[in-house]
Image (cartoon, rainbow, N blue to C red):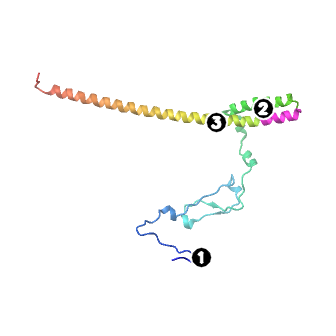
Amino acid sequence: MSQDSQSPPVVRSPPPGATAPPDHVNQPQVYEIFHGSKPEDRDGSISTTAASAGANAAPQTEGTGNKRPTVSDGFKTIKRDDWFRIHQIPCAREGFMTGIVTGFVTGSGRLIAGGKLSKGLNWGVGGFLISSLVGWEYCQAMRRKEKAAMARVVEVMDRKKAEKMKQAEEAARKRKEAAEKAKAEAARWYKFW
């Protein structure tokens, strides 16, 4: 039987023997979308679907009118003390040293090639920024690679330690059995030879 293109589709029941869908299918999830860094940055239009998700539902923001964070909002999160802790950031020293050397060489090379002072300074600052970022990313990639290698080493060491413990337990069990057997031999009152 074919359906008419004007009529709505017929909803069929599940086949015989089919089970009910899991609970999470009938209970929709409620998520909150964070567009602003602070609650007051959002437009305040928060709605919940308590009827479908229960009393412990997380608030959900409406998709229209949310204020998105800007670069200046990001700079506002930087504290003054953060500038005094730059040396503690992993790979910051390597990135800055790479940037300083590359910026100096790039700017000097531009000046020597016959450029104006302003062009040489611009090239030097650009070289510093780009090479600092590249140096920092390279250092971070090497750190990730080293961490993965260390994790593998620790895994292998743990496996070998577990194998040694198993061998030691097996050896102790065999010694104990041999001692019990020797004790049982000594406890007999007769000997064949």
In this picture, which residue range is highlighted in magenta?
Answer: 115-127
> Could you tell me what secondary structure mostly forms the magenta stretch?
helix
Q: Nearer the viewer, residue 138 or 188?
A: 138
Q: Earlier in the sequence, mark 2 or mark 1?
A: 1
Q: Is residue 153 visible?
A: yes
**What crowding class fits label 3: few (fewer than 14 Cα within 10 Å), some (14-19), or many (20 or more)?**
some
Q: Earlier in the sequence, mark 3 or mark 2?
A: 2
Nearer to us: label 2 or label 1:
1
Mark 3 in CB contact with mark 1 (< 8 angstroms): no
- Alpha carbon distance from label 2 to label 1: 69 Å
Question: Disc 3 marks which amino acid?
Answer: Gln
**Mark sitting on residue 103:** 2
**What crowding class fits label 2: few (fewer than 14 Cα within 10 Å), some (14-19), or many (20 or more)?**
many
Does 66 appear in magenta?
Answer: no
Q: Position of residue 170 (x, y in %)?
A: 32, 31
Query: Disc 1 marks which residue?
Result: 5
Nearer to us: label 3 or label 1:
1
Q: Report helix, strand or loop for mark 1.
A: loop
Instruction: Look at the picture and state if 1 lies above or below 180.
Output: below
What residue appears at the point 61 percent right and 34 percent down from the top-left corner? 143
- For the C terminus, the image quarter is top left
